[in-house]
Amino acid sequence: MLERTKIILFCFGILFIFFSCASLRTNEEFYGDILYDLRSGGFDAAAEKINIAELNGEYADKDRVLLHLDKGIIFHYQDNFQESNKEFDFAETAIEELYTKSISKGVFSFLLNDNALAYDGEVYEDLYLNIFKALNYAHLNNFDGAYVEIRRITNKLKALDVKLSEQVDQFNNSDDNKFEIDNLSIDYYNNVLANYLSYIIFRAEGEYDNSRISLEQLHEAWNTYPDVYNFDKPKAVLDSNINSSVYLNVISFTGMSPTKEAVGARITTFDDYVIISDPTNYYIQPIIIPGIKYGWNFKFSFPELSVFPSVVNRIEVFADSVRLGRLELLENINNVAVKTFEASKSITFFKTITRALLKGIGTAALGKTIKKETDDGILGDILVGIANIAVDATENADLRNWRTLPGYCYVGEFEMEEGTYDIEIRFYDEFNQEIMSTIYKDYKIIRGLNLVETFHLD
């Protein structure tokens, strides 16, 4: 009787813990109003809502990387470039510290839900924070600072491959692991947008040889990754002008970056192997696990990136009401995100399978004990159901990501005479309807870098 009471209390205890612990689920509801403001151009309102969310504890300590990324990009949208770089510095430092800690201490949650761990960012998030830092420095006329950030991007992409290899080794060497995965590579080491910024900044400073090299690297990146750059090259990089003429360069970011969606799947056990019922594009061979028994069925879920198009279909540039030309797509940030997410997604996928197996087998063993102690009656069925629900409740995919990042980058380059102009950028939808116009009154075109940056994040 005492043993039966302990089992009942244990089952209700874990049920209470799992359903009351918010750390086991991704907190994303508060983003709704923030993203609405961003899509409608309300950057000040979005910044205020982020501050309120921070004060209300919506950003937990484990989400501090996301807090700094969100603050950094909002400051950038507001043209507060110095504060933006401060926040991006905080984010970058936290990403490195969290990764170093996880490797040195072997923190690779097999039994914990990933939501319970500190978020250390995706590869593409770590990449684009440096790109926006470079843009910040360019706007501040600190070209040396911009060069540092651009160089960091190339070095970081190579280092991230090493990090991925370390994670695979840690996974394969874990005592809890049931199988091994092959070494992985992000297979993305050169970014077009970073090289474009380097190209126009070097040219503005009269460093034409370095400008030419940056442009060559841009074309190399484009040709190396046709799955990422699967659209026509913009005129701004095809008709290259590495000379001392005066140019207006316009960069426009549109849409929003991908969001993570939970994909559900199930593990079914057979004698000495398991199969995965998976509705996505994964093909998983039956996994051999000696000693496992037939008849268990466990639920799990993992994150996939979902990409959404922008309402912007065309962007036109005018100077003193005279049309200069159209902006063209230079970088699909969503493509870069999906490309770099694929490798790390595999680790998450197999780690989640391992965790689901460990929890599921443990729960099945508990179920047998419950059935025995309750004489295989109705109470036993209820308690087994509670235990199964509680374990399923812990298997929530980690859906955290940098939700305030744009999705697309357009560029245009126009040869100008030095002077003062009213620069206007007009955004059109697929029905050729103007949906927004941004005007820069009395913009001074000088010999050097003339960089205008606009946003329509819908």
Image (cartoon, helix red, strand yellow):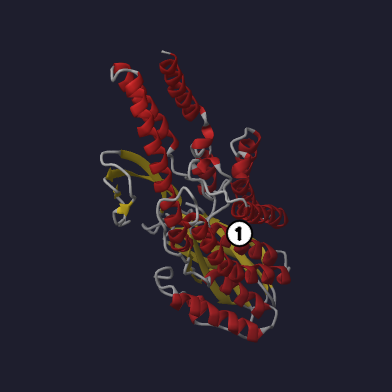
Instruction: Determine whether 113 is above or below 388 in the image.
Output: below
Q: Residue at x 58, y 45 (%)?
A: 118
Q: Residue at x 52, y 61 (%)?
A: 164
Q: Quadrant of the N terminus?
A: top left
Left or right of residue 51, residue 36 in this image: left
> Mark 1 packing: few (<14 Cα in 10 Å), some, or many (20+)?
many
In the figure, 20 relative to 358: above or below? above
Q: Nearer the viewer, residue 415 or 272?
A: 272
* Residue 283 falls in image quadrant: bottom left
Where residue 203 sits: x, y (%)?
65, 80
Of 169 and 214, the residue lying toward us: 169
Relative to 212, is 92 above or below? above
Report x, y in % for residue 197. 60, 71
Q: Position of residue 281 (x, y in %)?
A: 31, 56
Amino acid type for the residue under numbered disc 1: Leu
Give above or below for 357 relative to 164.
above
Query: How far from the left and from the top, in percent, is residue 124?
Result: 52, 60
In-front residue for pair 358/353: 358
Looking at the rendered structure, the secondary structure element under dot 1 is helix
Report whether 168 appears left or right of 285. right
Residue 299 seen in the figure: yes
**Quick check: 418 left or right of 368?**
right
Q: How many marks?
A: 1
Nearer-the-camera pick, 68 or 394: 394
Image point (44%, 63%), residue name:
339
Judging by the rendered image, the residue that carries numbered circle 1 is: 129
* Residue 349 seen in render: no
